Amino acid sequence: MKVYFGASISLDRSMLPIYQEINRELKTLGHEITSKHVVDPDLTKGEWQKQYVPRELFKRETDRLDKSDVMVAEVTSPSWGTAFLIEYALNHGKPVLALYYKEAAMPLPMMIEGHPDLYVAHYSKGNVRTVLKKNLEDFASITRRKGKLIVIDGTDGSGKGTQTELLLKYLEQHKVKNKYIDFPRYYTSFHGQMVGRYLAGEFGNKESASPYLSSLFYAMDRLTARDEIVDWLEEGNTVVANRYTTSSMAFQTARIEKKKREEFLKWLYEMEYKEHKLPKEDVVIFLYVPVEISQKLIEQKAKREYAKGKKKDEYEADVEYQKEVLRLYLELAKKYKHWEVIRCVDSKGKLLPVTKVHQKIMKALKRHGVV
């Protein structure tokens, strides 16, 4: 890939040997560096700043970024220019890896650490290549991605399975390459089976089981499906997922006391999307069904094996918990632009026909340009 390397130039060049090592490792891994001047030892000598007027310098560097696939930014030493170029890259759809030197005396800037779209990696002199390889392989898959990932989500009993089937039927009829995956994978995945055991109360009840620990079962189930999803997207498929990380963002967060929820959501997001490197969804379709109605729909389902023959597990049976989950889903939909709330009831609270709901979903997907 073509990599734009950014680092402090005019303020602090004490880390130049490390910058040069990073560049050597990038070349060893087969990448082309579009900003070789950053590691030029003579760059800060003389009057180099006067070689360009500001507008020319701006155009030169942004042009280099435009021609690059990704950006690698060394952020240990502060740099206004690097900070700007990071935002420029992100705003133009370029993945950015922010590298922070473990042995540095200064802490990682909070604005870097807290940025939702940055991939931050801590490194040392001995593991530069490993860190670069791990992250840039993931970036390469992002740049090769041709397909779209659609998530159908909602509270228990909201009709996700029915609407997923209708969407897949539509894609087949319109000859759109597609793949389908359903989470949790209770019966086909080692970790999915652990989810079933958790929901059956084997590891404690809703109050005693840690949301952090229970989230790991779901996250590992998705992690073991990651490579398959990545391959499908690289092949140009429209991938439809019945539930995804988005479900844990609501169901597990609802079990956290309110003042600690933002911290939990940050942890969950970083684990699944940044550490596990799950493909980010293009659009989330949230099916809004009042809990009173969804509870009746759950009653119509067959008994579940993982729930030891019951129609509802402990979490589905707790109406107040389901209401809190629903409220959290709606909050998340307001927070993220790629979420769409599909109301599955009319103004009188009566459940809409499944075909009407399907039509609303298709309109939303077309607005987002994924079908």
Image (tube, helix red, strand yellow):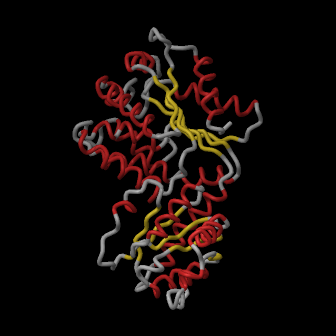
For this rendering, which residue is in front, 330 or 186?
330
In this image, 9 relative to 32: left or right? left
The residue drawn where x is 65% and y is 64% is 66
Find residue 292 and report its image quarter. Answer: top left
User: Percent position (x, y) of residue 63?
Assistant: 65, 67
**In front: 48, or 38?**
48
Report whether 232 appears left or right of 195.
Answer: right
Identity of the residue drawn at 53% across and 87% down: 47
Where residue 201 appears, as percent x and y from the top left, is 30, 37
Instruction: Classify residue 124 by image quadrant.
Output: bottom left
Viewport quadrant of the N terminus: bottom right
- Residue 44 coordinates in the image, percent (x, y): 50, 87
Give the x, y percent position of residue 30. 64, 77
Seen at 57% across and 14% down, the residue is 353
From the viewer's perspective, tell me whether residue 50 is left or right of residue 167.
Answer: left
| Quadrant that contains the C terminus | top right
Q: Quadrant of residue 368?
A: top right
Q: Is residue 160 left or right of residue 66?
A: left
Residue found farthest to the top: 348
